[in-house]
């Protein structure tokens, strides 16, 4: 089979590998679609701690495929279309027992700690299969859209942390794929207004098309005026920072109103992850400030349902599709910022 393999900083190489076979409790997928994530771009650049130089691992964790082989004890059937929830854990640590597999003491993830979906076939290990990470979906659904259930699940975790409800006014920093998902989720939760901060003019237009009430550049005064125009004279009910910008984290506390909820969704680069925040804003406005990372199987189930039911139009984010032979072009386009989501269809 063909596979895109990490061989070192700036080096993803298309190689031939033996096709794997499913053992007891395992499942083999034909990969129908695997979308490129910002994490994959960091891996390709050599900036991901899970990828040692020359590791030979296959990245890709936003995956939809077809079951082609199963071992004894696997409930999935040959020919099933499935989305793969990529995160799984040890199953016995405190976080796993609480259902927070994303916070496992020894976390594992397809395309991160083990081979992923930028290949023609993907072998899913018994632990992952046993934890219920193969999520079926019906015929006629675009696998490229289904692959985006993974980032949507992550956005759903962040959105739920903000407890957005009917009539809320929400601020979203960033209008990339995650920011657009947060707009859609806020609207589905009943928000009456969603104000977006995004410096890219094209993405501001996409934000409006996805349900934003207004979209602005990084001007703090503009954002405050937009909140006042939406009737939130004391500040937003919820603020989601879906952009890796320290200034956005600082501003989020200022834009949140009394009793507001803030989610630091986007992680910051390690070399500039320390941010000076006015903690009095948290104290005197009784803000709830959260961070979220990755997702659980439950959130993946919910995200997949939103896509399959047509409540979130994930497919409209896919601006380009490539095969494995054109993976270099796919990664170049994804890194350029000219496309929201780029999907590889092996």
Image: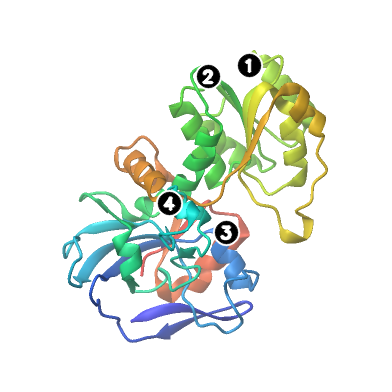
Question: Mark 2 highlights which residue?
Answer: 192
Q: CA distance from mark 3 to mark 4?
A: 30 Å
Q: Nearer the viewer, mark 3 or mark 4?
A: 4
- Residue nearest the observer in this picture, 165 or 281: 281
Label pair 3/1, CB-CB below 8 angstroms: no
Question: Mark 1 highlights which residue?
Answer: 230
Specify the quadrant that holds the C terminus.
bottom left
Label pair 2/1, CB-CB below 8 angstroms: yes
Label pair 2/4, CB-CB below 8 angstroms: no
Q: Nearer the viewer, mark 4 or mark 1?
A: 4
Report helix, strand or loop for mark 3: helix
Residue in the image at 46% along x and 68% along y: 111
Where's residue 101, x and y in %? Answer: 45, 54
Report helix, strand or loop for mark 4: helix
**Label 3 neighbour load within 10 Å: few <14, some 14-19, many 20+:** few
Mark 2 or mark 1: name the one nearer the start of the chain. Answer: 2
Question: Mark 3 highlights which residue?
Answer: 38
Question: Mark 4 highlights which residue?
Answer: 97
Where's residue 283, x and y in %? Answer: 76, 27
- Picture quadrant where residue 122 is located: bottom left
């Amino acid at each position: 089979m063909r596979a895109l393999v990490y061989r070192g900083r700036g080096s993803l190489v298309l190689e031939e590998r033996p096709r794997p076979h499913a053992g007891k409790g395992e499942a083999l997928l034909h990969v129908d679609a695997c979308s490129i994530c910002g994490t994959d771009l960091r891996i390709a650049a050599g900036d991901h701690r899970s990828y040692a130089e020359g590791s030979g691992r296959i990245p890709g964790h936003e995956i939809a495929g077809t079951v082609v082989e199963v071992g004894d004890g696997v409930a999935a059937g040959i020919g099933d279309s499935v989305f793969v929830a990529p995160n799984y854990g040890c199953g016995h640590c405190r976080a796993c027992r609480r259902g927070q597999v994303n916070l496992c003491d020894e976390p594992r993830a397809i395309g991160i700690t083990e081979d992923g979906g930028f290949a023609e076939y993907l072998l899913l290990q018994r632990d992952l299969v046993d934890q219920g990470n193969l999520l079926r979906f019906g015929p006629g659904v675009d696998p490229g859209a289904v692959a985006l259930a993974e980032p949507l699940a992550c956005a759903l975790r962040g959105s739920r942390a903000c407890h957005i409800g009917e009539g809320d006014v929400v601020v979203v920093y960033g209008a990339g794929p995650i920011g657009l998902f947060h707009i859609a989720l806020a609207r589905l939760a009943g928000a009456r207004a969603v104000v977006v901060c995004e410096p890219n003019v094209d993405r501001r237009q996409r934000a409006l098309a996805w349900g934003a009430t207004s979209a602005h550049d990084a001007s703090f005064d503009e954002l405050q005026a937009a909140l006042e125009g939406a009737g939130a004279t004391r500040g937003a009910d919820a603020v989601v920072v879906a952009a890796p910008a320290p200034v956005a984290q600082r501003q989020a506390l200022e834009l949140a109103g009394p009793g507001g909820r803030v989610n630091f969704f986007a992680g910051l680069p390690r070399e500039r992850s320390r941010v000076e925040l006015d903690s009095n804003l948290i104290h005197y406005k009784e803000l709830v400030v959260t961070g979220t990372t990755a997702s659980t199987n439950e959130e993946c189930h919910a995200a997949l349902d939103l896509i399959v039911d047509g409540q979130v139009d994930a497919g409209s984010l896919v601006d380009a599709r490539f095969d494995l032979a054109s993976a270099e072009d796919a990664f170049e386009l994804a890194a350029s910022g000219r496309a929201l989501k780029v999907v590889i269809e092996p």
